[in-house]
Image (spheres, grey):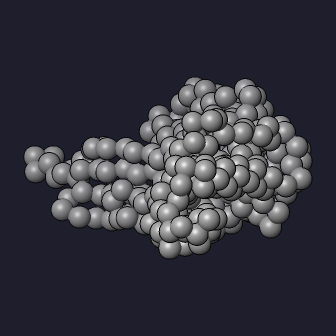
Amino acid sequence: MLKTLHGPRVNFATLAIIGGLSWGGYLLHLQSEDQASWPWLLSTGISLSFFATLFNYWRYLKISEAPISTIAAAAQGYVELQGTASTAKLLKTPFQGIPCAWYRAWAYANSYDEETGRRNTRLLEYVESDQLFQLTDETGGCTVNPKGAEIIYAEQRTQLKNDHRYVEEFLPLAQPLYLLGYLDTRHHFPIAETINRDIGTLLASWKTNPMKMLLRFDHDRNGKIDMLEWEQARKEARREVEMHHQMRVNHHESFTLSKPPPGKLYLISALSPQNLRSNYQCWSLVHLGLLILLLMAFVRLI
């Protein structure tokens, strides 16, 4: 449960609920001077503060215990990586068209009820990208599957248009990211179908420049490519394609970071690990202090 909740939202929601309970208890006290509801209100606040303290401390430990590594030196398993994001295929946010590595977006309809004088907001659409993106550091790169990740401190843009509100959260390209997840370092070599397709593509590109192809493969200089020379061209194309795929494997582009086994946190953050650890540590202390105050109030009440 601790790994499935969104960090910043939990903290602010806990403070808001405890504040609401305290204010509600105070209003009840002013109206009736009856303290019968206070034990229940304090018990609820104590439970929430205890949960929030554990929530933040658990995340602080998870971030602190994961081994820090470069992509090239990373071993298979649960790792902590830092790098910049890029995409093989252009990805843009759906409403404002901002190039990014990942996004999620909401479209809301705003309406005004003349009878009640209240404004209503209705969710029309929610979309989230699941396209893989690349993470690169000074030693190499790996592929990131964002599915199932908690993505925090992403950039946010809001646009108001024709009584609609469009909200987008996204990870910009070429911006530093911190990731905590499961790295699969097993080399995934391409299947024969992929290699044959790439060979065909390379040969087609060579044929667009006949003069260059004749200079390269017309060994008897008769002005045309015969069957033996064409077979030699195919062998050369296969050699180049296989070399290209081997270079990708050697440069770790076949490594994949994805959701870890149950009980592990899968996190993608635009905030550095140092700042993230400080945040969770500070929030743990805030909720612990609030827990102590509520316990003291409960003891005095009983």
Q: Is residue 108 above or below residue 157?
A: above
Residue at 41% over, 51% down: 105
Could you tell me residue 133's position as x and y percent? Answer: 59, 53
Front residue of this view, candidates 150 and 146:
146
Residue at 20% over, 59% down: 163
* Residue 66 visible here: no
Could you tell me residue 82's position as x and y percent? Answer: 76, 59
The quadrant the C terminus occupies is: top right
Could you tell me residue 251's position as x and y percent? Answer: 78, 56
Residue at 82% over, 45% down: 79
Residue at 68% over, 36% down: 259
Front residue of this view, candidates 212 and 20:
212
Relative horizontal placement of residue 211, taking residue 43 as reference (left or right): left
Front residue of this view, candidates 79 and 118:
79
The answer to which image quadrant residue 166 occupies is bottom left
The quadrant the N terminus occupies is: top right
